[in-house]
Image (tube, grey):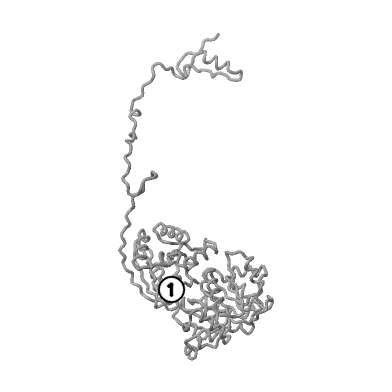
Amino acid sequence: MNEPTQADTTEATAVQRYSDLSLDPRLLQAVADMGYENLTPIQQRAIPIVLSGRDMMGAAQTGTGKTAAFTLPILQRLLPQATTSVSPARHPVRALMLAPTRELADQVYANVHAYARHTPLRSACVFGGMDMAPQTAVLRQGVEVLVATPGRLLDHLEARTVNLSQVQFVVLDEADRMLDIGFLPDLQRILAYLPAQRTTLLFSATFSPEIRRLAQSYLRDPVSVEVARPNATATNVEQIIYKVAEDLKHAALLQVLREHGLRQTIVFVNSRLGASRLARMLERDGLKAQAMHGDKSQAERLATLDAFKRNEVEVLVATDVAARGLDIAELPGVINYDVPFNAEDYVHRIGRTGRAGASGLAITLACERDGRGLADIEKLIKRKIEPRELEVSRPARLPRAPRESGVAAGAPPRPQAARRPAHDPWFDKPYEPDPGASPAWEQTPGASASRAASGSNIRSRRKVAALLGGKPPAAK
């Protein structure tokens, strides 16, 4: 395969507005309905290439409009084949868009559905964690644009509920993330179902040697478009690192939320258990917080995300499942409660804020053991971030409320009766034998006779007088 060629930007950069593009009026109307007017750099360079039918590798900072960069030209190319027929055979899958996570797939589908709202083109989204029956019913009705995660798409392929023999466009969105979570074998199996003559688009916020090898294997003479330095962070996002002690992180988080006035923010942690635990702690502090991680079902994750978008949740405590694909309008900031294990995840985490040209704030709480992780982040983004000292007062321990019911908070404690001493003097007395008691081993003949008479099978134990220093019993 040939190496990717750089795009010629002389003509592409001359187009600054959507209205200047040679797109169908129905697509331009959908873009206007969403309030978009100006093209982003990745859209200026990618849309003409996709319209020309070339394979492409696109790299741009997260939040710069990559979804529209491949969705709009694909819809434009599919419109001549669009039909209002109700026959499923007239609506085969012509465009396949693969995403690594459920949240990203749902976000891409929402954009596809919005851009195609004024056209007869049908779209659908399939991902794991949900029942396959409703997805199968939608697929059998026929869709032109299918957004899917690799695992669930393979389930439908094995069940023969979807046919990819007429696919003309394939999009690998966030391909680096797919490789990170081990989707390469699934991608190879899916691409084997597709026609050889197709247009393949590979988009990612970061490019690595593994991604370029993947492009050489499945892309034909691709055009490489990089509108920003690889792994660069958005310039409109202010990045702050606070040095705090490990046991003061929770207090530091509350102080940062209060001082910076972050009424809606995403707090990233590294573990699912840590996300649930921190969300419960923030709720006890009076904040509306919910956790979002991989252990929750897809319905729960979608409900939590919808509540956060409606401002019903102030703090969304999430793992890296929320680091990609979440497009929340005017999110003021994100907080890294834990420094990510992978430096590239830092780029995607802070990319949730400062989207579509808005300003954002990214705060990281780092302790002494995070020095290596911070060094990896600075090496990746090629930028030095000087840590700041954050004076956090150790929270005072609140007095425990009385256990008695009916006692008001702050009321003086009830007088308690004097307790008995824990030590009983009776146990300090010396042993005093009872002079009237006989030893247990000195039993009367009557007692032995009564025991002998209690049953024919019970024999009395023979006394061995020699062991006691006595004389043997006389013979009768």
- Return the x and y of residue 183 as percentages of the image width and height: 56, 70
How many numbered tags mark residues here? 1
Residue occupying image coordinates x 64% and y 65%? 133
- Return the x and y of residue 96 as percentages of the image width and height: 60, 76
- Return the x and y of residue 406 as percentages of the image width and height: 38, 45
Q: Amino acid at mark 1?
A: Glu
Image height check: is 108 above or below 77? Answer: above
Q: Nearer the viewer, residue 471 or 194?
A: 194
Image height check: is 260 above or below 114? Answer: above
382 with respect to 72 (left or right): left
Q: Nearer the viewer, residue 431 or 289?
A: 289
Quadrant position of residue 156: bottom right
The residue that disc 1 covers is 330
Task: Tell me the quarter of the image containing the C terminus.
Answer: top right
- Return the x and y of residue 388 as percentages of the image width and height: 32, 68
Quadrant position of residue 435: top left
> Disc 1 on helix, strand or loop?
loop
Residue occupying image coordinates x 43% and y 61%? 288
